Image (tube, rainbow, N blue to C red):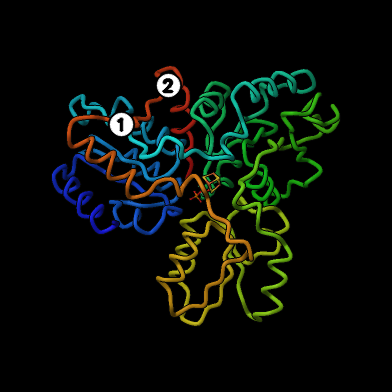
Amino acid sequence: SSDELNTRISAVREQLGERLLILGHHYQQDEVIAQTDLRGDSYKLSEMAAASKACRTIVFCGVHFMAETADILANRPEKVAERDGAKVTVILPDMAAGCSMADMAGIAQVEAAWADMAEVIDTKKVIPVTYINSAASLKAFCGRNGGIVCTSSNAAAVLDWAFARGERVFFFPDQHLGRNTALKMDITEEQMPVWDPYALEMGGNTDEQIQNSRVILWKGHCSVHQMFRAEHVHGFRKQHPGIQILVHPECPREVNDLADISGSTGKIIDTVRKSPAGTKWAIGTELHLVNRLKAEHPEQEIHFLSPVLCMCATMYRIDLPHLCWTLENLRDGAVVNEIKVDDETTKWSLIALERMLAVK
Ligand code: 13P
Ligand code: SF4
């Protein structure tokens, strides 16, 4: 039962003390969140992994790319030196907790796209930007090619950084975050061709479209956030006058354009926390987070923006049985489900991640 698992997990946490750090993304289910030491959006989680000093093991309740990022940041040479040479082991409780968006951009596809576009534009003047929701190999590609990583909370600042250094941006894997962010910088949809990795030539674009581009968007999306539609916004506005629409920038353009506020999960939470009693919201992001906000803020009226209860199936794979299994193994001296990025990938992806952490 959950009670029994909670007791067993708490016992290991107590025994390992500060050496163990359990991190949780806001999309995790409540009973997992209750067992985390720290929680955050993707940016905050990477900062927390980067800062860890006392800890020797991070158990990451989130998805694969987050655990990879934690391994890269927590094991930077200067951090290892601060711990007298001790490295941090990063564990993902269920190895099947991936991200379908991250899977939409494979490194071979991105490299092929880069080579194709080099036929019609000077790629030395293109800054590759990868959303943190991507494999470490893509972050390494960005590090090697003068590029950078972004999250949903710093995408605008990162695009400013990129445009200060190049003529155009190649943005992957999420077309929606790229488009929604660039539209606010007075870049038009016409200047943002979408690169389809399965198209036969030039990602499905003419040479002119690529030559006239300012941002080339990868054809990727989040299967959860693509479920939110403009008609849901219209429906709520009609039925609940005065309602405010709060969405994640992974939602499609039409939804972002119609929303009152758009931001990372951290911003969504802060916005609700700071709002007065009686505020009415329809929120377009993962179901577990919206349900938790509903439970934590009974003084406000919170609705889920879609009639379909969309949740992230891979985030949901992390549950108490998996968490308990990894922790008890750890206590018994066995590391299961370790996430370890190879040295070469670490070296280059760290460059792109450190560029991001330096952008304010
Ligand atoms: P943030 O928590 O950074 O907003 O990311 C949302 C998300 O989809 C994570 O997979
Ligand atoms: Fe990936 Fe979307 Fe799930 Fe986030 S919510 S992990 S972007 S599939």
Image height of 192 relative to 224, above or below: above
Give the image location of residue 248, x and y in percent. Answer: 58, 56
Establish if 328 lies above or below 6: above
Under tag 2, what secondary structure? helix
Which of 185 and 12 lies nearest the eye of the viewer? 12
Say which amino acid is labelled 2: Lys
Q: Is mark 2 within 8 Å of ligand 1?
A: no
Q: Point out the residue furthest to the left here.
A: 15
Quarter in which the N terminus is drawn:
bottom left
Q: Residues within 10 Å of mark 2 (few under 14, many from 20)?
A: some
Q: CA distance from mark 2 to mark 1?
A: 24 Å
| Residue in the foreground of this view, choosing between 50 and 326 | 326
Quadrant in the rendering for residue 148: top right
Q: Residue at x 68, y 22 (%)?
A: 114
Mark 2 or mark 1, earlier in chain: 1
Which dot marks residue 347? 2
At x 44%, y 17%, the residue is 344
Q: In terms of depth relative to the viewer, which is nearer, 71 or 84?
A: 71
Position of residue 132 measured from the top left corner of the image (x, y, whole percent): 51, 38
Residue 333's quadrant in the figure? top left
| Disc 1 element | loop
Q: Image point 48% across, 28% down: which residue?
A: 136
Question: Label 1, on which residue?
Answer: 336
To which quarter of the image does residue 56 belong? top left
